[in-house]
């Protein structure tokens, strides 16, 4: 088991008969030849190690310990704090929009309002006219239109759908949720 390399332990290993850095390392539990990193560490801790190996007497100083007075600090009183009230939700409910304008914002909100107002129209015609009218790119209008046409799209979240029965045409309408207990008018 390796022990920590300290000035005192290195000098003790030399006094016990270690004649090289490898023997000092072995005295501390290292195996094999000493690495350059370990040798550098030993030399940094005891810079006069060459003199100790040569048998020259080196004065070993005991560490200087100074007494420190610690001031007495009055105990701090902490006022009683009530823990915050945590509300536990036992049942998760899904909120459903019941308004006729389910989209907000510059792109989706304005494209939706335009799509509802024009009624049944060709998709390509709608994209080019709306892009020019609303100062949007055709890609922005096309993407928003495709999202609004498919109620199963992850961005749509069942807010609108396409009710046109013809390929290449669209007629967007909002999906309005019926309140519980109310009957749908047909």
Image (cartoon, rainbow, N blue to C red):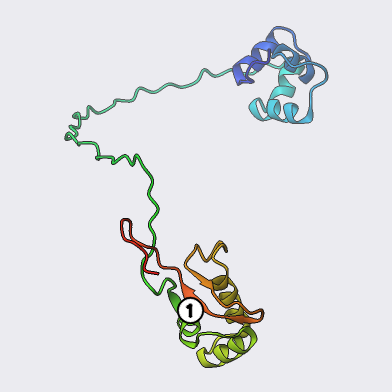
- For this orientation, the residue located farthest to the right is 33
Place of residue 155 in the rendered image (x, y in percent of width and height, measured from the top left)? 53, 65
In this view, the residue in front, 71 or 106, is: 106
Question: What residue is drawn where x is 55% and y is 86%?
Answer: 136
Kindly identify the residue that appears in the image at 79 percent across and 18 percent down: 22
Q: Nearer the viewer, residue 27 or 163?
A: 163
User: What is the quadrant of the C terminus in the image?
Assistant: bottom left
| Residue 15 figure quarter | top right
Where is residue 170 drawn, in percent x and y? 58, 80
Q: Residue at the location (29% across, 25% down)?
A: 69
Can you say whether 83 is above or below 186 in the image? above
Residue matched to label 1: 112
Could you say where residue 8 lies in the image, as x and y percent from the top left? Answer: 60, 16
Q: Is residue 70 above or below residue 124?
A: above
- 57, 126: nearer the viewer: 126
Q: In which quadrant of the rendered view does residue 144 lie?
A: bottom right
Please, what secondary structure does the residue beneath circle 1 have? Answer: helix
Q: Residues within 10 Å of mark 1 (few under 14, many from 20)?
A: many
Total numbered circles:
1
Residue at position x 62%, y 85% from top?
A: 138
């Amino acid at each position: 088991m390796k022990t920590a390399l300290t000035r005192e332990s290195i000098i003790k290993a030399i006094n016990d008969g270690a004649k090289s850095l490898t023997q000092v390392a072995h005295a501390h539990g290292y195996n094999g030849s000493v690495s350059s990193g370990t040798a550098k560490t030993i030399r940094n801790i005891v810079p006069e190690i060459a003199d100790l190996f040569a048998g020259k007497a080196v004065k070993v100083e005991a560490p200087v310990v100074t007494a420190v007075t610690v001031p007495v600090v009055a105990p701090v009183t902490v006022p009683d704090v009530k823990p915050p009230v945590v509300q536990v939700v036992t049942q998760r409910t899904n909120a459903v929009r019941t308004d006729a304008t389910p989209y907000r914002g510059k792109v989706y909100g304005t494209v939706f309002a335009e799509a509802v107002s024009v009624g049944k129209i060709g998709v390509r015609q709608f994209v080019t006219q709306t892009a020019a009218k609303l100062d949007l790119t055709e890609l922005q209008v096309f993407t928003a239109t495709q999202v609004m046409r498919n109620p199963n799209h992850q961005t749509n979240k069942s807010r609108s759908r396409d009710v046109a029965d013809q390929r290449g045409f669209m007629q967007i309408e909002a999906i309005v949720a019926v309140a519980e207990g109310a009957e749908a008018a047909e």
